[in-house]
Image (cartoon, rainbow, N blue to C red):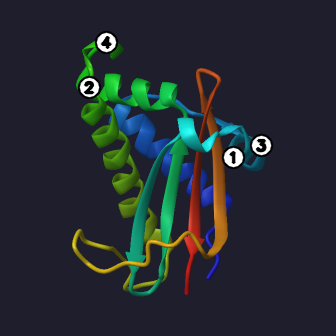
Amino acid sequence: MRISAADLQRIVRTVWSTQLGLELETADADGIAARLRAGDTAVVKIHFVGGFTGRLEQRCSPHVSLCAAAAAFAASGTDLGTSDIRDTVAEIAHMTAGNLKSVLPGGCEVAKAGLPVDEEDGGTVVARAGFTFEGEPLVVDVIQTA
């Protein structure tokens, strides 16, 4: 199974554009990934089960997270709480994962909350897409674990 970086880029850009009205700029994925520091980065992991076993990992800078939440809530950054920002970034990652099912092997499902999933960070990156928004980094990986 091979998902292309172009498919992943298209899906991520479409979700961010249609759901938030934010236009992402495509960037060198490995370079963008290297810019993200673990302590400052909003990370969301969405697990897949069935025809594809693995996860989507979305990582972005605090600025990108704040801009996403501001767009989602039609609010200024100062009106948003930590949970608003966290929930927005998680919801966008879930939407991206749901759209990815169309290019993953049949029978693939997004793991529902409460299902046991492997929380370890192992696996192989099978697709990576890098972006910037207002010069700040966002990277999305699809990682196969089995």
Q: Residue 9, image x and y in percent?
A: 59, 50
Judged left or right of residue 35, residue 20 is left
Numbered disc 4: secondary structure? helix
Whether pointer 2 and pointer 3 mark residues with C-beta atoms closer than 8 Å, the reply is no
Q: Residue 121, image x and y in percent?
A: 56, 69
Tell me if mark 4 has few (under 14), some (14-19) or many (20+) residues whose alpha carbon lies within 10 angstroms of its own: few
Q: Residue 132, image x and y in percent?
A: 62, 32
Residue under pointer 3? 31
Gap in angstroms between the C-alphas marked 2 and 3: 30 Å
Q: Amino acid at mark 2?
A: Gly
Numbered disc 1: secondary structure? helix
Residue furthest front in the image: 39
Whether pointer 1 and pointer 4 mark residues with C-beta atoms closer than 8 Å, the reply is no
Q: Amino acid at mark 3?
A: Gly
Residue under pointer 2? 81
Gap in angstroms between the C-alphas marked 2 and 4: 8 Å
Residue under pointer 1? 33
Residue under pointer 4? 78
